[in-house]
Amino acid sequence: MVRKTAAGQPAPERARRARSPAQDRDKALSAVPGEASKRAPGRPRNSERDRPDQTRDQLLDASIVLFARYGFDTVTTGQIAEAAGLTQSMVHYHFGTKTKLWEEAMRRLMRQRGRLFRVTARDLAGLSPLDKLKVLTRRLIEANAASPDHVRIVVYEATTRSPRLQWLVENFLAAGFGVFDDAVREAMDAGVIRRAPIHDVTNAVTSAASLSFALHAIVKDMYSVDLGEAEAVRSFSDTLIEILFNGLLVTRATQEAPPRRRPASNRAV
């Protein structure tokens, strides 16, 4: 039987076959019948505009993963949209440019990281200057293990010397380094660690606590140790803190003292 149009005329079969799945999907997703055909090029679909917060977060989360894996320069907005399961027009609708998307993704990543790097004045209250520095180091290791994308993005921007690095420094990194600078200075003033340029000490501590997680694949392939696992994180924290604050040289005290292993719940310094 020949199908007919609303006007009673036969509908050409090849015209029906010419409609692509994408056209069918656009029509199904339109809130108003016929809206898909009226949507101007580049304008987001109604279904995407009706949930702006969710759509925005999808794009930010996808961009964080891709920027960490491939770097800013090689990732396109089309790839980000595809990874988020959205159209490329949504990137421009919500952020305008790839640079703006990157900045908003970094803000989202840093908010997430702030929840992971849990150190408050109450956590440090009553601790000696040396123990404060140990707690900060351990918390930094734990945050990097939980969110290695942060480290990978910072490493990429630092090695390419991009203008985005300066943006990161001014908006986020300077404050974090300042926390360590203050702790190092306090420990030096208290006479519990030797005098050295503060930036050297901060750089040594933070680099050791961070770069290992950017290069975790080497450790996994060489030693079959996954630095993302809780026990591996605890072991690395213990070892790094021991090396940083007590050194690698064997002394009479270290020969006589048994290995100190406390329950993870009580291990603060």
Image (spheres, rainbow, N blue to C red):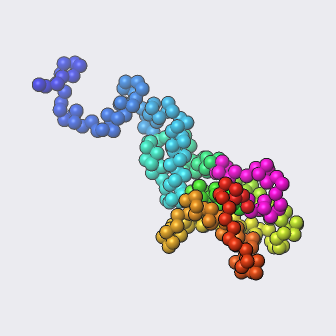
Q: Is residue 54 above or below residue 112?
A: above
Q: Residue at x 54, y 46 (%)?
A: 60
Q: Is residue 193 magenta?
A: no
Q: Is residue 148 above or below residue 14?
A: below
Q: How many marks?
A: 0
The reply, left or right, for residue 49 in relation to residue 110 is left
Q: Nearer the viewer, residue 198 or 233?
A: 233
Q: Nearer the viewer, residue 182 or 86?
A: 182
Q: Residue at x 83, y 62 (%)?
A: 129
Q: Residue at x 69, y 67 (%)?
A: 260
Residue projecting furthest to the left: 1
Percent coordinates x, y for residue 48 in the rendering:
47, 35
Determine the main secondary structure of the stretch shown in magenta: helix
Q: Which region of the structure is painted magenta?
A: 113-136
Percent coordinates x, y for residue 173 in the rendering:
70, 57
Residue 44 appears in the rendering: yes
The reply, left or right, for residue 10 in relation to residue 94 is left
Residue 174 appears in the rendering: no
- Tell me the quarter of the image containing the C terminus: bottom right
Residue projecting furthest to the top: 7
- Tell me the quarter of the image containing the N terminus: top left
Q: Nearer the viewer, residue 65 or 2?
A: 65
Percent coordinates x, y for residue 94 in the rendering:
55, 40
The reply, left or right, for residue 261 in relation to residue 181 is left
Q: Residue at x 53, y 35 (%)?
A: 52
Percent coordinates x, y for residue 120 in the rendering:
76, 50
